[in-house]
Image (tube, rainbow, N blue to C red):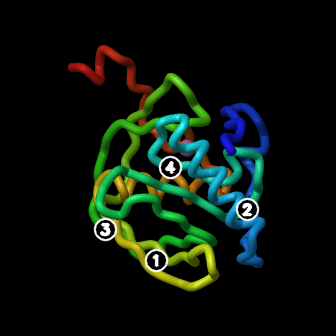
Amino acid sequence: MVRNIIKLGDETLRKISKPMQKFDLRLWLLLRDMADTMYKADGVGLAAPQIGILRRVVVIDVQDEHGLIELVNPEIIAMEGEQAGSEGCLSVPGRRGYVVRPNKVTVRAQDRNGKFFEITGEELLARALCHEIDHLDGIMYVDKMDHEIFDDEENA
Ligand code: CO
């Protein structure tokens, strides 16, 4: 089911999300709704607080070999390098910002059944991992951006 995406300015986006403790149907329905909502909005990632659920759950799909990535209670355990580029957010429609992120990150998370795993991403996937995990701590890309990107600049 496609859910409503909360927009910048709503204080829900600024709250700290709680860890997920039960890996049951409730979580699976949340994951399904999050994926439905992300794909409908043409996004590459969505965090649970963006649909008003203050739980540490993230979905990402950067259209690479990983397909749909589901992360429960994710934590960044390693990062290296640096990338600077354009970043957007489904909670900040119509805007983009120039944000510096690590070029490569490794995340430890649990899957939908509670099993721990690690995933390493570079470039866009690394950016998406950092961006979505920030949402779980109430952090938005606009807090970290160097400057707003306008259309003429992006096409330049
Ligand atoms: Co976002």
Residue under label 3: 80
- In the image, residue 103 above or below residue 139: below
Residue at coordinates 71% horizontally, 77% vertically from top-left?
A: 23
Q: CA distance from mark 2 to mark 1?
A: 20 Å
First in sequence: mark 3 vs mark 4? 4
Q: CA distance from mark 4 to mark 2?
A: 15 Å
* Mark whose residue sits in front, 2 or 1: 2
| Image spot of residue 19 (x, y percent) | 72, 71
| Image spot of residue 47 (x, y percent) | 61, 53
| Image spot of residue 63 (x, y percent) | 34, 51
Q: Quadrant of residue 11?
A: top right
First in sequence: mark 4 vs mark 1? 4
Residue under label 2: 55
Q: CA distance from mark 3 to mark 1?
A: 11 Å
Disc 2 marks which amino acid?
A: Arg
Q: CA distance from mark 4 to mark 1?
A: 20 Å
- In the image, residue 131 above or below residue 152: below
First in sequence: mark 4 vs mark 2? 4
Residue under label 1: 77
Sort mark 3 into few (<14), some (14-19) or many (20+) by Cα contacts within 10 Å.
Answer: few
Which mark is on residue 45? 4
